[in-house]
Image (cartoon, rainbow, N blue to C red):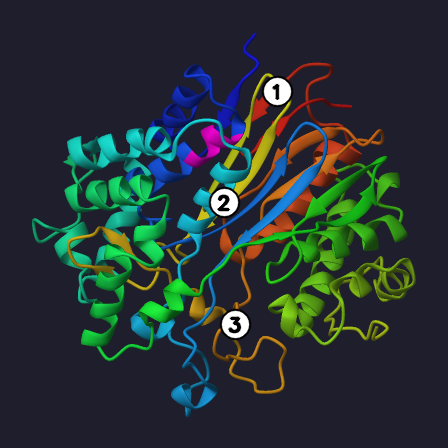
Amino acid sequence: MGHNAVATSQPLAAQAGMKMLQLGGNAVDAAIATAMALTVVEPTGNGIGSDAFAIVWDGEKLHGLNASGRSPASWHADLFAGKTAVPEIGWDAVTVPGAVSGWVALAERFGTLPLTTLAQPAIDYARNGFPVSPLIGHLWQRGYNKLKDQPGFSACFAPEGRAPRVGEIFRNPAQANSLELIAKTNGDAFYRGELAQKIAAFAKEHGAHLTAEDLASHRVDWVDLLSRDFAGGSVQELPPNGQGIATLIALGILEQCGIEQHHPDSVQSLHLSIEAMKLALADLDRYVADEDHMVFAAKELLSDHYLKSRAALINHESASDFVYGSPTQSGTVYISTADASGMMVSFIQSNYMGFGSGIVVPDTGISLQNRGCGFSLDPNHPNALAGSKRPFHTIIPGFAMDGNGKPLMSFGVMGGPMQAQGHMQMALRIMLHGQTRRRRLTLRAGAWCRAGK
């Protein structure tokens, strides 16, 4: 039985990660190579202009990485006066892309192979072509219908005047060149060099606010994880600006409700799970933002006292319409990798809403995300739009530990706003109800499990 694994949504990308393991690389090397390849073979969910987050088990401890970008420094709420929300497409939705910085930060801290080696499969797929798979072909057509008139989109992703058909070989030589340049310069070309200048020039051409200075000032953050004990182990999530805290809130509420007493597919178990997640999402919607702008520490939403008070609101016989509480004031791709040494990586990156903003920088293959639409236009909300600020994010990597402080699984799901719910469901199924194989290394679509119950 193999002792290395890569799980993701596209087999060609998984092969890129496995190749790094075969070359002697570790789980981080595999995750980076897979992530870079996914920007090529699954452009309907991510790209070079994505954001990214990761949780890494280095064999001894967990590390959290927030590689999401911030809004242009000149953004302010008056830019969208008269609107009810930030636009979902076009330049007004574009924030600084962070995925490239995430690849570089992971490689510098944990990688063993050069970034040029990690990028090679992605470069090869982009330059020599790859077959468009059925699901990607469907999503590509849908994205084309929506975004074909956005600057640079059709020239890059519909060079024949249409979306590529299923089974066709698609090549993106401009993206190959960009990936090659990123790898050779260790990401510097993207944030301060040639590619940064192209991005900034294209933004200026269209009267957009993103500047070379915005790109150059970008930084990643290594962060402490939020944790909640559950089912004899613990679930680990990154702190805001992501929605992982909603998973922990819901699990804490469910423990207060005695969820372990119910069969996982019983009406009562499903009812409690739905109600707990509704409560968690109500708090998420009201309080979560860039952590530097929250009105209180995120951990206040996870206190036993607060979760008990929220659980008490659940009617065990009927559904309720919940609002947020008052704690004490004090489109996406997912990758899971593991190697024989015990290193494990939970990694996620996304343009959001498929292709993102629809903006593609000419002659680069760089499609830009639309994470700006994650901001609120309510000036009194902690997630209110402002300059140099991270928007609320839907994408979250997850991790679980057993009762002895050893890694149980790296896990995650795709699906935008349902990801916190998906994490809760996986924790219930695998951790509480033991619905995984016993005493074996098991690979699942979305989770690499070291052990089961």
Mark nearer the viewer, 1 or 2: 2
Q: Is residue 203 visible?
A: yes
Q: Is residue 172 shown left or right of residue 51?
A: left
Which residue type carries mark 1? Thr
Judged from the image, the secondary structure of the residue bearing numbered disc 3 is loop
Residue, disc 3 = 389
Q: Quadrant of the N terminus?
A: top right
Q: Earlier in the sequence, mark 1 or mark 2?
A: 2
Which residue type carries mark 3? Lys
Please state the horizontal and vertical placement of residue 389, each as a whole percent of the image: 52, 72
Which residue is nearer to you in this view: 74 or 296? 74
Residue, disc 1 = 442
Q: Is residue 449 shown left or right of residue 98?
A: right
Q: Magenta segment, which residues?
A: 28-32
Residue, disc 2 = 105
Direction top: furthest residue: 1
Tell me if residue 65 comes above or below residue 119 in the rendering.
below
Judged from the image, the secondary structure of the residue bearing numbered disc 2 is helix
Q: Main secondary structure of the magenta part?
A: helix
Q: Earlier in the sequence, mark 3 or mark 1?
A: 3
